[in-house]
Image: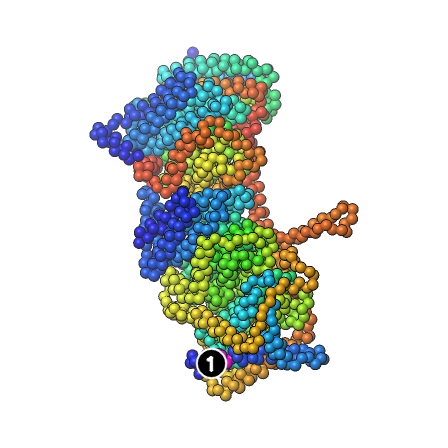
Amino acid sequence: MLLFFAGTLLPLVFRDPRRETVASFVPAAVSSLLTVALSAWVLLSGSVLRLSSPVVQALPWMSLSFFVDGTSAFFMLIIGLVSTSVSVYSLGYTGYYAGKHGIRTLGSLLNLFVLSMVLVTATNNAFSFLLFWELMSLASFLLVVYEHEKESNLRAGIIYLVMTHIGTAFITAAFLMLYSQTGSLSFDSFRSAAGQLAPYTKDLVFVLALVGFGTKAGLVPMHVWLPRAHPSAPSNVSALMSGVMLKVGIYGLVRVTLDFVVPNSPGDAWLGLLMVVAGSSSALIGVLYASVEHDIKRALAYHSVENIGIIVLGLGLSVVFMSFGLEALAALALLASMYHSLNHAVFKGLLFMGAGSVVMGTGTADMNQMGGLSKRMPWTSLFFLVGSIAIAGLPPLNGFVSEWLTMQALLSSYQVPNVVLQLSIGFASIAFALTVGLAVATFVKLFGITFLARPRSKAAEEAAEAPRAMLVGMTLAGSLCVVLGVLPFVATSAVASAFGFDMGLVSSYTPFGPLTVGYAANGLRSVSSLSMPTVLVLIGSAGAALLGFAAVASSGRKTLTRRYTTWEGAFGALDERTEYTATSLSQPLRTVFKSFFRPHTSVDREYFSESNHLVKKSVTVTSESREVFEDQFYSPSLHAFVAVLDRVRRIQTGKVNSYLLYIMIVTIALMVLVVVQP
Amino acid sequence: MQVPLPTLLTLTAVALLLSTFGVVVRRGFAGWLSAYRYQSVILAGSAAVIAYETGFWEIYVAAVLTLVVKAVIIPRLLVRVTESVRDEFKIEANPFVSIRLSLLISALLVALSYGLIRETLSSASLGVFAVAYLPVSLSLFFIGLFVMVSRRMALNQVVGLLVIENGLFLFTTALTQGVSLIIEVGILADILVGVMISALLLLRMSQTFDSFDIASLENLKDD
Amino acid sequence: MRSNLLALLTSGGVPPDWSTLLLTILLTPAVAVGLVTLTRTRRYAEAVTVASVLLVVVQTLALVAGVILDGQFSALGGFLYLDAFGALILIPIAAVGFVAALYSVSYMGLQFERGVVDDKHIARYYQGFNSFVLTMLLVPLANNMGLMWVAIEATTLVSVFLIMLYTNQGAIEAAWKYLMVATVGLSLALFGIVLFSYSNTSISPAVASSGSGLDWTSMAADARLLDPGIVKIAFVFVLVGLGTKAGLAPMHTWLPDAHGEAPTPVSALLSGVLLNCAIYGVLRFYIIAQGALGVALPSELMVILGLLSMGVAAASIYFQKDMKRMLAFSSVEHMGIVSLAVGFGGFVGLFAGLLHIINHAVAKPLMFFASGTVSQRYETKVMKEIKGVIKTMPITGAFMLVGGLAVAGMPPFNIFLSEFLVTTSGFGGGQFFAASLMILLLVVVFAGFLRHLVPMIFGSAKGPGISVAADVRSGGHEELLAVLPMAVLVTLVVLLGFYLPQPLQTLIRDAVQVFGQGAPAR
Amino acid sequence: MTGTLEVVVVGAMQLVAVFALAPLLTGIMRKVKARTQKRIGASVLQPYYELSKLWAKDEVVSDHASWIFRSTPWIVAIATITAALFIPVFVPFSPFTSAGDVLLVIGLLALARFFTMLAGIDTGSAFGGIGTSREMMMSSLIEPGLFLTIFVVSLTLGGTDLTSLVGAAAAKFGVVIAPSMLFGLIAFFIIILAETGRLPFDNPATHLELTMVHEAMVLEYSGRSLALIEWSQAAKQLILLGLLANLFLPLGMPTSSAAGLLPLGLGSLAALAKVVLLSAIVAYAETRVAKWRVFRVADLLTVAIASAMVGMIFFYLQ
């Protein structure tokens, strides 16, 4: 067992200067496989790993101790799966950086990043948790500013690290509140004291943890760094970051809600409600921004905000159910959200890898320059299609299953006795449904504009297919999507054993057994179920029936297909300028939700000669939607804070007299204070 | 003639306060120097009185030392340093606080130190010297500090510093009848070296800024 | 390395006579000063300085080993005295002194090459350097508080002398302000010290007669008997006085100018070590005040001053333009953290505070050396004109990044360990408001630091207004002697992040015991 | 009657019936519309002739289009067929209940819509672009409406499993006229209009780029693929109308699936009659209203969402 653990650590940190690309990523792949093996073993055997090495003898409760139980094993599984495919993918991807930057630094930082994530999920002590937590953000910060020539990357990096640091400050406050109750920093003591926390501290700890981990996971008010940091990182890193790092944030949230702040009284329901509201609003806002974005990586980053919102929605529901003692429903909601986090890690990783190879091929991330790549990069477009279908939650693949579970959880919220909760969860389900609808629309745009129709720029024309290693990486992730979609029992059993619900609760986990959700209200009993394998069989049979019918119907005449140019309404040859671009495609959406985006379009005309304004040389219309959160919430508060700082700064006046005056005032003030003090 | 001790002590205390007010009033550098020299002489006198009363021989040595260092060496040092600088820089043109106001403030400070001492240490059983000299030394400290704060010329700040040092010396001799001699010598050495270094600085300052005005010393700040 | 040394010494059978070591450790730098004044050649002065400081390091290790073994001992009839707390302060003086000596060889060498400094300056520099080390060594060893005051006053005078080395306007202004503010502060401190000794002598006539009124040991012994009225006023005077030297908030104004203008090795010593000596003085009297007045009042004062200095430092760092001034303000912030830690009290708080002194003494000089080399290379201290350090000087760039993140409090490094402990003690001690305010201020400092550090280290060095002087001297673009000290410090910074060597832990625990000695029977 | 063999047989039978009758339904709709506009209109069987004609014609495919364009018709057809297997249009129970429920059907329809939108972009012409962008906006609003109606229905009739839903609707007639169900009905009716591309949302008849949404996406198709798309479009219409009929107007439906052959036959006839009646109503509604501006359509869909919400509130607050 320890061997396993050392196995994951050793190769991760190893970096070999000479044969860079291979040497740094092969150990990464091997070690992530080991992580997968370790977590699978823990999940199956349900046993617990424990290891601890104290840092300071004098303070026993402060040690680097590790504890791998079901929950951490489940998240380790996610990390392992995605990092295996990403490290295989980055074997090919580093070619893109061959000339400009040292591959060695990229390789070692990536290893460090994955290592710190694995360790975060394994720690058992608040101090070591924070240590690895910030190590993770430090490694990802260095990766974000990897291409540090571009000024925008630097700013994104700074915002990212400062935001995560604020998040860590909240988490530290939460842990130390627990420390003040229990007197020790180890998670075991937190767990043992979970029961008898005073209600006041319990709420405070919960809110602090929600804000802290929310910043890392990218919940709405604190999501500002996400759309900036992910696109500026190299693609294989942003695949890891949005696929897995956000999940570590969720891991923290799960750890706090389930272990330390166990919701056991109706009073805690409002905590769950807070999560539901935060989740659904961040889902809605994330997808709204994603649907209008024309930079492919920013769109995917915004989309991560949306999926995280769904996961937190599921968590919130489980907290609400738990606080009313509805164990079965709580397990269902938790299953839905954990399953969704597993799915999201897989298909978001796949999509970012796809985006990476597209960016590598065309050299730009702006979708308006792309188009027609499916002909030149057939494999990448296939994988991207698989990813889009999965993320949009369409039937055959895994996205649909987790969304089905979340919907069932939402639908069964009627059993919550409190009416206010029922209604608010109902309204949250509207936001959720709107998100699902918009997600389909976003990915039509994302996939359609990038891969279909005619190439819109020179670069898109000569885009070359991604190197073989990248494709292998993507096949790994793609096949995972399909497997998780078709055989949901694989994931459900993993989640069940991870979170320790007893098997019978949700459904019988036979390989082909359907996922069933019971319904019993005002006298009507029904069991709605979904068994993907049979659905697949049906689709296959329908297809066969159709082909048979087509063959029979056209027995006589053999129809042939001719290729001819698209019908262009008799305007003469179409060139790519008349094509729909990403921005135009999302224009109806923008007008419908204009109160949210408040797009301001600026039209500037260029004239041949200043005298007559009638003959226009060119009219360019630029319209971009402003970041609502940026203007209303962040910049004003930032300016106010900076203004305060500015005033404090003034005391360094530079004159000796004023310095001496300060000393005089302080002496007299303190003397008066001391004399007055009893 | 056997002058009763308490009146003698109050007499020297009053003389000390008068000399400090002299420092506050004078505008020109020469004026300050003479006031300072006068103050150091009285200080040495009072130290001698304490030594006579308590019979510790170390205090005599300390008194003589202060007399030599503070009354003779330091003033000559300052005069030699400031010879090269033109006269008008040695006059305090317009201090932050007008002379009259600064007089009032120093009186206030004296009252403050007396009040403070009575308020805090009334309970402690103070020796006869402490009763007389403690508030004086504290007021010396505050007035010295006030002089440094309110004056615009660098020279004045040195003089303010020296007034504070005098207050210090009085404080130590009055309270504990003189700490062990080595420490006394150490303190005096520190003061001497301090004044030498500030003289060096003044010299260097007059070469670069060719004026002692503090205004030129303000570019190191957070604009 | 320390533990085997320990074994070596004790294995000698006869317990070595520690007190003679106390004397020799003071003599070495004194001899060095003499030697340096005699010679005029630069090479010889450098060699002497490095040798003497190396000797000091060895002796310090021996002394520390002694303290761990025998508790405390004294020499010259109780005049010199060393206990765990003093030894703890001794370590950074020796360690940073040695590293600074190494660094100044290359730094002053480069300055000499560039004609910024001539031969006379170099000689004066090394004189000042050695006497600076001497005076700083004297502070923790002095049992007699008067002697300690004289030592601190001497450190001020010597450091003013060192700041005055460059004859440009900024140096003079900084030196003048430093001298004025520090001397006023110290005279105030002397008021306090004498009051303390007065209260000590007025209680027990035996002490008065033996003339040991000023000895700390006697004060600590009957701390509980002292008259609270006098001790209150005395502690305020000492706190404000020595606080000025330590750079606590309202009295910190001289610090950015002095540390900004001094030559880099000196400002490293100033920031890394001198502030420790001043805080050492404050804490010595904190123990006695704690004994006499109970913990409430003194800790409240320390918490107020701590938060004040962190607030002021956080504000100024955010807007700073000059690299060294930013580091100076960050020293103010870290001293605030130490006083906060002591204010929070309890075993954890004191342990964290003392650990933070060590951590800060290791991390801050690293940053000063890195910024020194960079500002030498870019010939400017203004941060806007420095970009792409990681490109032009990879090793120093990496060290600067590690140091910068460490000083800003980024977890994997040592500063975070002690800061985290301080906040834990804050929450443990129930001071929720102060601790959460501290966390907020830490975040502001972190943001401010990052705002300046990242554009400097990354970014492209070719931008407008950025002139990178080709290195004048040897082909290698980074002087070995400059990089070596930094490498030593970086390993310490990273290592101390999660592993505290055993001897260090026992030393800190004994030091905390010393604090306990003064505490009233709770 | 519910052994796995019978389930498959009934399912297959229902599938054949759905696909056979679908074109008839569109024929009837066009007939009713023509009649109300006082013109004779083509015969009811006209759609059948069109389909068979298209089936035989050659296909023209644009050279920019990728494999997605050519495979979309097949995917859309398969998706609709699978959806048809689950919906109890004529038979009072959904044949493959154990495999899926209403949400799965919505997912399958969404899959079909997803691929049609992609095909629209693939041709690279501006028309396809218009169709897809409008469809994107509309579908993203239809989804919440659909989900909320199901939410209301599942609250009142219990769960999302179709058989139990239909059974409950048929059994307890009283439940159906509950206020929440009425609001659900209004919302569902509007959603069907939008989903099948009826008038207020999209004019199926014209090729004018101003008004067409669904047509624009399939503009480029011809020959067999156009036939397939038209056919699955009609089948979708029939499925949705059947769902509306069974859930909200369970008049002639036999209460449980175990009833004998005769009631089942009767029930399916009644269902057929209802579906025909509904399509007539829809056609009639179409003639009454003109095409709304594309962005005002969003308001109509919000009306649907609002009514579903009110239905939910009624259910909870009762």
- Farthest residue in the left direction? C13
Q: Quadrant of the N terminus of chain D?
A: bottom left
In the image shown, does A475 or A464 lie closer to the viewer?
A464
Category of crowding for the residue at label 1, using alpha-carbon neighbours closer than 10 angstroms: few (below 14), some (14–19), many (at least 20): few
The x and y percentages for residue A3 are 31, 51
The x and y percentages for residue A302 are 53, 55
- Farthest residue in the right direction? A611
SS of the residue at dot 1? helix
Q: Which residue is rendered at x = 49% and y = 58% of the image? A: A379
Judged by its main secondary structure, the magenta piece is helix
Q: Which residue is rendered at x = 47% and y = 48% of the image? A: A94
In the figure, residue C517 lies in which quadrant? top left
- Farthest residue in the top direction? B1
Q: Which chain carries label 1?
A: D
Figure check: C105 above or below A505: above
Figure check: C202 above or below D84: above
- Residue tagged 1: D9
Q: Can residue D44 be seen in this snapshot?
A: yes
Q: Is residue C461 magenta?
A: no
In the image shown, does C409 or C243 lie closer to the viewer?
C409
Q: Which residue is rendered at x = 40% and y = 28% of the image? A: C102
Q: Which residue is rendered at x = 48% and y = 29% of the image? A: C471
The x and y percentages for residue C309 are 48, 37
> Tag 1: residue type?
Val
In the image shown, does C171 or C467 lie closer to the viewer?
C467
Give the total of numbered labels: 1
Left or right: A605 with respect to C8?
right
The x and y percentages for residue C259 are 48, 30
In the figure, residue C2 lies in which quadrant? top left
Query: Which contiguous range is marked in magenta?
Result: D10-14
Figure check: C370 above or below B210: below
